[in-house]
Amino acid sequence: MSKRNLILIIIILAGIVGGAMLFYYFYQPQSQIEGEVQDVNFFANFFPFGDKKPSSTTPSTNQPTDISGFEPTTEEEKIETKIQKVSSFPIAGFGVFMKERFKEITPPAESVTTTPATKTTKLVAPPTEFAPTLRYVERDTGNIYQTFAEKIDERRFSKTIIPKVHEAYFDNKTESVAMRYLKGDNKTIETFLGLLPKEFLGADSAGINELKGSFLPDNISDMSVSPDSSKMFYIFNTGDSAVGIALNTITNTKSQIFNSPLTEWLSEWPNSKMITMTTKPSANVPGFMYSINPEKKDFNKVLGDINGLTTLTSKDGKMILYGDNNLSLKILNVSDNNSNSLSVRGLPEKCVWNSTNESLYCAVPKSITNTVYPDSWYQGEISFSDEIWKIDVKNGNATIIIDPSSSEGGEEVDAIKLSVDETENYLFFINKKDSYLWKLNLK
C-alpha cells in the first residue's frame, strides 16, 4: 500500500470516530421507565462536561443537607406568647397611650411614572397608624423607657437621672410624669413633676431626651390625674388637716378644692366632674368614701361604715367597685344606691374598668389565708398568687382568662396597677413581688 493511500485511510477513520463522538456528545437516550436513570452514555461519562441538557427523567427527591444550623420556625412558635414580661428591670410606674407610627408597606412609598417623552417621580406620603405604646420609669435611675405593646422593643426615652424613684404617675397621654422619692434624710417625700419632650413622627430621639419641670410641695401623701391629662390633684398635710390642690399642668395654676381634719386619704379622678376621696383602709377601722365636683368644690358622702373599705370608680362615675376586710367585692349603683356582690374575692385596686364600663378585669387571689386584710397585704407580710379574670358587670358572670403561674412565659404574680389600652387588646400590670411590668394579650 502506498503511503498516500495509508494517510487517506487514517483520515477517513478519524472522521468516523469524531462523528461518533459528536453524536453521543449531543444525544442522550431517555430511560424507558419513568423515574429510573440509566447510565447508557459511555462517552458522556468519559467526558462529563458535555452533559448540559436537562434530563427528562424524574428528579431525585433527596434534598441537600442543611449544615448551617438553621431550624425553621414551627407553627407553635409563631403564635405570640399570651403573657409576657415587658420591662427588664423593676419600675416605679407606667402609662399607656396611642402613638402614631408609619405602616409597613410594600412597595415603598416612592413611585415612578414613565411616559414616552418624560419621566416623572411622584412622592407619596406613607400611611400611618396609631398603636398602643408603653412608657415606664426605671426605679433605680428614674430613666423613662418606652416600647410598642404588640412587639416588645425596650428603648430608653430620657436620660435624666433621678435615683431611687418609689412611685411614678403618668398623665393619660404620658406627656408629663410625677416622680416621688425620699430625700437624703430618708423621711421627706419629694415629688418632681417633669414634662416629657414631644416626639416627632419618624424621628429617632431615643435616649437623648431630658426632663424639665418643677418640684411640688414636700410630703405629698397621694395624687391622681384628670382624664384629659391637663390637671393633677394632690393631697398634703398642713398642721392637723389635709389640703387638696388641683394643679393645671399646662398653665401651672393651682386651686384648693379640698380641706379636711382627717389626714389619711386616697384619691381617684375618674371623670372631669368627679374626684373620689376614700379614707385609707384598715381591717378594724370603719372606712368612708366621698365625691368632689372640682368646679363646685362640694363634698358628698357615697359609702361609709365599712371596715377595710377600698374603692374603684367606673369612668362614668355611675358604679363603684368596693371591698371590705373580708376581701368581699361588691358593685354599688350610684343612681339607686343598690349593691350587688361579685362571685370572686379580692381588692378593688387589683382591678380595672374597661372603657365602656361594662366589664372589669381583676387579679383574683387563688387562695386567701385567714389573716388581717388589707393590712397584712399592704405591709408585705403576705403575697398573693393571682389569676386574671374578666367580670361582666351587668350579669355578674366571671370568667378566668389565665393563670400566669402555669402559662408559658408566665410566672407567679401578685398584680397591681392594672391598666387596659384604648383598643382593649392588652392588659398591663406590675408584679408586686418584684415590680416588673407585664402584658397580657386579651384577643
Image (cartoon, rainbow, N blue to C red):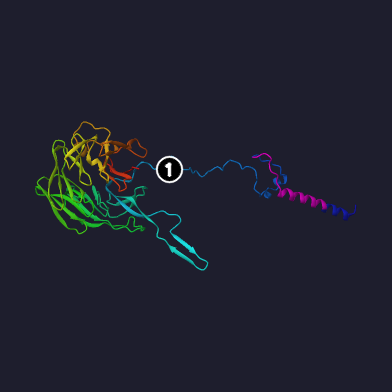
Residue pictured at 52% horizontal, 66% vertical: 116
- Prevailing SS of the magenta stretch: helix
In the depicted view, which residue is nearer to us: 170 or 162? Answer: 170
Q: Quadrant of the C terminus?
A: top left
Taking the image as drawn, is residue 114 in sight? Answer: yes
Residue at the top extreme of this rendering: 370
Q: Which residues are magenta?
A: 12-34
Residue pictured at 39% horizontal, 56% vertical: 127
Taking the image as drawn, is residue 432 in sight? Answer: no
Residue pictured at 21% horizontal, 31% vertical: 370
Q: Amino acid type of disc 1?
A: Lys
Where does residue 14 sit, x and y in percent of width and height?
80, 52
Please indicate whether residue 240 sits to the left or right of residue 386 in the image. Answer: left
Which quarter of the picture shows residue 308? top left
In the depicted view, which residue is nearer to us: 236 or 37? Answer: 37
In the depicted view, which residue is nearer to us: 272 or 144? Answer: 272
Which quarter of the picture shows residue 159? bottom left
Residue at the front extreme of this rendering: 336
Q: Is residue 15 part of the magenta span, yes or no?
A: yes
Secondary structure beneath label 1: helix
Please indicate whether residue 69 sits to the left or right of residue 210 in the image. Answer: right
Q: Is residue 266 above or below residue 251?
A: above
Residue assigned mark 1: 78
Q: Is residue 343 part of the magenta span, yes or no?
A: no
Where does residue 1 sit, x and y in percent of width and height?
90, 52
Please indicate whether residue 411 sits to the left or right of residue 18 in the image. Answer: left
Where does residue 172 sit, x and y in percent of width and height?
26, 51
Q: Label 1: how many residues lie within 10 Å, few (<14), some (14-19) or many (20+)? A: few
Residue at the right extreme of this rendering: 1
Where does residue 217 sit, x and y in percent of width and height?
16, 53
